[in-house]
Amino acid sequence: MPKQFRYKHVQAFTSHPPLWAFFFVLDCFKIALSPLLMRPADVERTSQLTIFLEMGVAQNTTSTIPVNVGVVLDLDYLDANVSLSCINMALSDFYAAHGDYKTRLVLTTRDSKKDVVGAAAAGSLSAPLVQAILGPTTSTQANFVIDLGEKAQVPIISFSATSPSLTSIRSSYFFRAMHNDSTQVNAISALVQAFGWREAVPIYIDNEYGEGIIPYLTDALQAVDARVPYRSVISSSATDDQIVKELYKLMTMQTRVFIVHMYRSLGTRLFTKAEEIGMMSEGYVWIMTDGLTADFLTSPNPSVIDTIQGVLGIKPYVPTTKELESFRVRWKRKFLQDNPNNIDAELNFHGLWAYDATTALAMAVEKAGTKIFGFQKANVSSNSSSDLATLGISLNGPRLLQALSNTSFKGLTGDYLFVDGQLPSQAFQIVNVNGNGGREIGFWTQTEGLVKNLNPSINKLRNSTSASGISTVIFPGDTTSVPKGWETPTNEKKLKIGVPVKDGFSEFVAVTEDPSSNTTKFTGYCIDVFDAVVKALPYALPYEYIPFAKPDGKPAGTYNDLVYQVYSKNYDAVVGDVTVIFNRSLYIDYTLPFTESGVSMIVPIADKNSKNAWVFMKPLTWDLWVSSFCFFVFIGFVVWALEHRINEDFRGSASDQAGTSFWFSFSTMVFAQRERVVSNLSRAVIIIWCFVVLILTQSYSASLTSLLTVQQLQPTVTDVHELIKTGEYVGYQKGSFVLEILLGLGFDNSKLLVYNSLEEWHDLFSKGSGNGGIAAAFDEVAYLKLFLSRYCSKYTMIDPTFKTGGFGFVKSLSNLGISISSMANKCIVSHVFPKGSPLVPDISRAILNVTEGEKMKQIEDAWFGKKSSCPDSSTSVSSNSLSLGSFWGLFLIAGFAAFSALIIFIVMFVYRERRALRPSDSTASIWSRIKNFITIFNQRDMTYRTFRQSELNDRNGISPATMGVPSPSAYSVHAEFPADPSSAGYDSSPSRQAPQEGVIDIDQLTDQNQERPTALEIDHENT
């Protein structure tokens, strides 16, 4: 090293070591490029591009071309020597299998001396120049070297720098020949989710390796609803006392799930101290990231393994193959030959990745070609003070970069391919440290989740997040019981539970002072429920009740003030009839409610059935009465129109016809119609209409019977807006948030009265709205049901119900390190906690356990009494009158049938009488045509069978009433036939003569020996 170079760096090192490191690396690169700078001036002026031809490239005196590659490792570590051994074996194996390749990698190894300065050896590789660098070892060293490789366009391939922060550098010349640390965070979060742990504390080393994974780990935990309440950062130079101090700090917190991410040396000391102070006992959970897991379990140290019993670990999964096993045996033999003192060394993941990375580089160098192995000198001014500016640029760098990006093969670790400069994530193996090493309990993949075995045919359709997907875990303390993930702090401080103080409704919560013993007694439904819930927890939870009262025993504030005490950390929880509403949920959390939710209205009930002379009108609403009358008239008209021309019963004077039509239609109500109908269309209409009338009359009878015999209790008020419009007084419970709802609905504050007990409530109702009382009351459903349990025969609950969340327990465990998870918008009875508390899910599950059992029924019976025989007051009362909405379908069917029959009749009539309806005078007026139509319609249809039968009876002197059953040959059938309308002599005038009579000899029709005539024989009378 030149004297000037040594002096400059010695001087920089004594004043500022990091600055010395930077200049050291830059000068190393300059020395490496010095042959370029010493080229003849004429060559430099010609092209400004100097090509350095490596080791016989220009002379072409050898059959293979050596390509220099730098290797930067911390050779003081065993893992680095393992990796270097794998690199050498990779080159031997590769060129033994590819003897025809023209290139040969020549390694120049440098020791990085465990820090960033030593990593500068990558640049101090003097001539011959390097085309790529394998290494460095750590993420901190890689972060320094990557920038130099980017400027010199020399690929940097690291098989041990795992920090995700290196990706953010966005250097296209950096290749990570292993998995990124961020790929394992989803496997860790899956474990946390599978065992139901709600919080986890990461413990990591204070450097780039430790800090790089934390943002990804936090996001992954939050994605499975697990919080990170604290981050424990330990310096790499921390003493044992500092480590113990930090561990004691963790013991004072509630979280018992720890995720460790650090180097082996620091991790060994951490677990040793954790065992000494009792943090490796039952109830604790320790999870190691892949680096620490691989370091501990690849070459297990018995003393270290003893301290981490029960710990869970994550490590990359490398499938076992014949090639891998064969290499493992060969490597062991070779390594012991080179390092006879390291008999305990084992092949680790870094060695496998180093082997595959070297193979990939050898393939890429061959693929890139051998045309250009030189550097272009940077164009810098003579007075430039930047050492970095004098670095040359590799001419082969872009070609080698492209070749590396496109290289893929089957390596020892599986399919090998760079995606965006790093290997894609694959499966991770879950191990549990037991006995002398790690016990494999399952796997995790992105698509399958947690599984016991990797079997794509079985697991391809599932993504398991359950602990059942892996084998049984033996946790610290040699137990298979899954730790709940948190514990009450070791100081055993009791939770301070705030209880509201109120005068009325002692059934829910009551605070009484005992002067004789100077103690406070807490009773009520909510108190008993909370006591039962705590007993149902799977662990002990010490607590004490504290009344929210002034020194004189009066309430210290409203319920909002009480809940805010949780947020202010004055109370750890609140138990009482605390309503779950949205604005409170913004700063505290609730457990599951244990009463019914909602705010509703309660009003007095009275029998509104006045049994007067007009009670028979009440079964039907006015619209149904009107609709029924209209349909009776319409059906009568349709039947008259269909029967008028063919039925004598529907003929006569206009008054007779109208009377008959109305009589016939309305008599169908009692099915007493005497007139017979002869038209098939009329019969169809009558059948459908009688069915409608049957349904209508039966419904009317049932409703009228109910009105006359059953007491109809109805609310005095059914509409909130009616109360506002009429200015009625309404009541609400003192101190309740219901006041805000009433004011929001539009009630005048002067019309609102308060009550503080069931008795006051009932008294206000008894007085009435005009006498200092109320017409209605608004309260939560739980209070309404309590009120109705005592006065169920006098009042009823009316919808609508304004949904809230019921009662709940409020809790704030800030002084114990506990916060709350959100369950907003509930209004019933619920327990209140601070945001994020792990107690919330536990107590919520305990509430479900209590409410589904007999214990809850016993508590309710003890405070509210057993259910009486009163009707369900929550059912809203509605009118018994029948409306058109219940029958419009029937009317639609009847109306359609009648209208269709009328249309069919009119079409047939017009067609048959088309010549008669056609006026002889084309200039006739509309009125004349209408008169002609009415005249023709009013005439009998003598062609119909009823009139033919009547004419025949008249000719034979037989009346229908006395006619017997004569022989068919005893008479002839007489019928009137009109002239053929289509004949030329047909008279279409209104004064035309009546149809001619024709006589049919019945004997001709009945004589079996005679031939049946083909036409009727008609004798026409002379006119």
Image: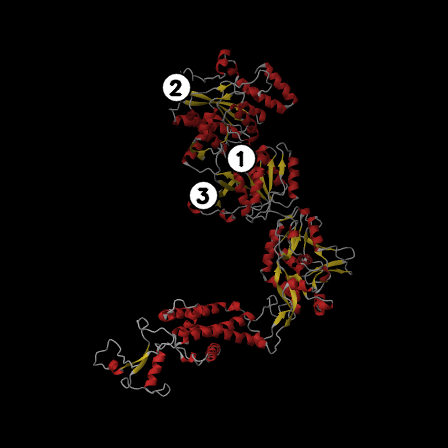
* Pointers 3 and 1 in contact (C-beta within 8 Å): no
Pair 3/1: label in front: 3
The image quadrant of residue 961 is bottom left
Viewer can see residue 862: no
Could you tell me the amino acid type at mark 3?
Leu
Mark 3 lies on a secondary structure that is loop
Please, is residue 883 above or below residue 277 in the view?
below
Few, some or many C-alpha atoms within 10 Å of disc 2 (few <14, some 14-19, many ≥20)?
few
Few, some or many C-alpha atoms within 10 Å of disc 3 (few <14, some 14-19, many ≥20)?
some
N-terminal-most mark, 3 or 1: 1
Q: How far apart are marks 1 and 2 (CA)?
A: 43 Å
Of residue 732 and residue 21, the one placed in the foreground of this image is 732
Pair 3/2: label in front: 2
N-terminal-most mark, 1 or 2: 2
Mark 1 lies on a secondary structure that is helix
Which residue has dot 3 on it? Answer: 454
The image quadrant of residue 881 is bottom right
Could you tell me the amino acid type at mark 1?
Asp
* Pointers 1 and 2 in contact (C-beta within 8 Å): no
Please name the residue shown 49% across and 41% down the image.
429
Please, is residue 875 above or below residue 445 in the view?
below
x, y percentage for residue 628? 51, 72
Mark 2 lies on a secondary structure that is loop
Which residue has dot 1 on it? Answer: 295
Please, is residue 202 above or below residue 568 in the view?
above
Say the numbered circle drawn on residue 63.
2
N-terminal-most mark, 3 or 2: 2
Q: Distance between the residues labelled 3 and 2?
A: 47 Å
Viewer can see residue 190: yes
